[in-house]
Amino acid sequence: MPHVIVKLYSGRSDEQKQRITDEITKAVMTATGCSEGSVSVGVEDVEPSAWIATVYEPDIVAKTDTIFKKPGYTLA
């Protein structure tokens, strides 16, 4: 039962979010061999001013052992 949470800067349209969801769903199905009905994807909007406190520090910096694709940026 893979569940993926995507956090991105707010401002994307529902159509863009659905395309992201569709592509992630396909990738997860291919990589895990699970059915589409087993995959769920959440998309969370994050204001740019809140990115460091709500995403970068708690989800990237604090969980480096779970990050398999690291960002190409660093923030102080």
Image: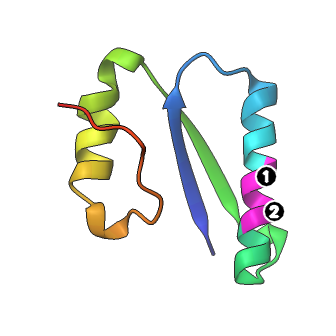
Side of 12 relative to 26 (left or right) = left
Q: Position of residue 74 (x, y in %)?
A: 28, 38
Q: CA distance from mark 2 to mark 1?
A: 5 Å
Residue 76: which disc?
Answer: none
Locate the C terminus and report the quarter of the image it occupies.
top left
Number of numbered discs visible in the structure rendering: 2
Residue at figure coordinates x 29%, y 69% from the top left: 65
Side of 43 relative to 73 (left or right) = right
Please check the rendered image and state whether residue 25 is part of the magenta-colored stretch, yes or no.
yes
Q: Please name the amino acid that badge 2 sits on.
A: Lys
Residue at figure coordinates x 82%, y 68% from the top left: 36
Q: Please name the amino acid that badge 1 sits on.
A: Glu
Locate the N terminus and report the quarter of the image it occupies.
bottom right
Span of residues in magenta: 22-27
Residue at figure coordinates x 57%, y 58% from the top left: 4
Answer yes or no: do the residues labelled 2 and 1 have beta carbons within 8 Å? yes
User: Toward the viewer: 61 or 37?
Assistant: 61
Please check the rendered image and state whether residue 37 is part of the magenta-colored stretch, yes or no.
no
16 over 7 or under it: above or below:
above
Residue at figure coordinates x 78%, y 38% from the top left: 18
Q: Which residue is mark 1?
A: 23
User: Toward the viewer: 37 or 68?
Assistant: 68
Q: Which residue is mark 2?
A: 26
Judged from the image, the secondary structure of the residue bearing numbered disc 2 is: helix
Side of 2 relative to 32 (left or right) = left
Q: Position of residue 69 (x, y in %)?
A: 47, 59
Query: What residue occupies the far front of the structure in this picture?
Result: 72
